[in-house]
Image (spheres, helix red, strand yellow):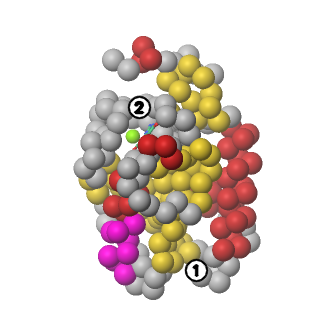
Amino acid sequence: MHPNVLKVLVPQHTIAARVAELGREIAQDYAVRQPLLVGTLSGAFIFMADLARCIDPVPDGLAVDFLRASSYGGTATVTSGEVKLGMQLKTPLNGRHVLLVEDIVDTGTTAKRLVEELRGQGAASVEVVALLNKSPRRTVDMDLRYCGFECPDEFVIGYGLDYNEMYRSLPYVGVLKPECYQ
Ligand code: 5GP
Ligand code: MG
Ligand code: MG
């Protein structure tokens, strides 16, 4: 375990098993709908890569694209409430069935904003899959179609999630030691 990690919340093998389940469920649901997976950078990059490979059997026309969204900036550990979007999708969304792939849904502000953006670009449907769900902290109404794990109200890192751009490469989801927050 990384020396700055207080505890592991979701071990690597537990993540892998759940991601495989989600992948099979999504494969069934999108069997005839040519899904476009839209990953939100940077937090969802590992989840997106693992999930995409677990969507089996592969639906015809499955494609991937990426958006960038940020609401924290630097060393904050709670959302600023203002969602900054970066990067344009490469894919025209008209008629596409979009599955937005998120690392974590906390207040729900970011996911809701992104869903509105994707619908605005003409998607035929937009659903959300998140690895982690801090459901007790939700402040906006948004429909989380697929969720890996419920997450306690703690600041978590690893498996794509950062603190000040660090710890994304850890293969598990964990809680940082308090002394690591300056
Ligand atoms: P929301 O807009 O739902 O409040 O926040 C969503 C975004 O905040 C996530 O995509 C993620 O980037 C960040 N976030 C929320 N909770 C955590 C957390 O516990 N750890 C980390 N690293 N990021 C979080
Ligand atoms: Mg995110
Ligand atoms: Mg972050």
Q: For residue 117, what is the image quadrant? A: bottom left
Classed neighbour count for the residue bearing mark 1: other residues with Cα under 10 Å, few (<14), some (14–19), many (≥20): some
Residue stretch in magenta: 115-122
Classed neighbour count for the residue bearing mark 2: other residues with Cα under 10 Å, few (<14), some (14–19), many (≥20): some
* Residue underneath mark 1: 34
* Residue underneath mark 2: 163
Asked if residue 117 lies in the magenta stretch, the reply is yes
Q: In this view, does 63 lie above or below 85?
A: below
What secondary structure is marked by label 2? loop
Residue 66: x and y, percent? Answer: 42, 61
Q: Residue at x 48, y 39 (%)?
A: 161
Q: Residue at x 56, y 19 (%)?
A: 6
Farthest residue in the top direction? 179
Comparing 88 with 121, the one in front is: 121
Residue type pointed to by label 2? Tyr
Does ligand 1 reach within 8 Å of label 2's beta carbon? Answer: yes
Rendered image: mark on residue 94? none
